[in-house]
Amino acid sequence: MYCKICGDEDGLTGPFRFWSPDDGWIAGRLCLSCKGTELKRKPAESDFAYEDRNLYLSSEDDAISEIYG
Ligand SMILES: [Zn+2]
């Protein structure tokens, strides 16, 4: 497993859900420093994924199964 943001393999959190400007709500493991950043991120109108209601309402189950799948 590796951090979804920076690819670091050390000190990962458990999987949790966070907002990606490109992909919408996704779930994954992050390192602690990326988690600190991502937990503060909120969907913004300028984000690529903002307009996609399907992603916004999302598929946490799909994201989880992508991890454990
Ligand atoms: Zn990271």
Image (spheres, helix red, strand yellow):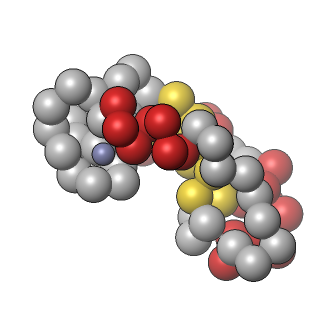
Q: Quadrant of residue 28?
A: top left
Q: Quadrant of residue 52?
A: bottom right
List x then y, in percent, for residue 46.
75, 78
Answer whether residue 24 is visible to the viewer in this image.
yes
Report the residue that reaches farthest toward the top: 14
Instruction: Give left or right: position of 19 versus 64.
Output: right
Question: Image quadrant for the N terminus?
Answer: top left
Q: Nearer the viewer, residue 62 or 14?
A: 14
Q: Residue at x 35, y 49 (%)?
A: 4
Q: Residue at x 53, y 45 (%)?
A: 38
Answer whether residue 68 is visible to the viewer in this image.
no
Q: Nearer the viewer, residue 6 or 56?
A: 6
List x then y, in percent, for residue 48.
67, 78
Instruction: Give left or right: position of 31 versus 58.
Output: left
List x then y, in percent, for residue 41.
64, 50
Instruction: Give left or right: position of 11 versus 43.
Output: left
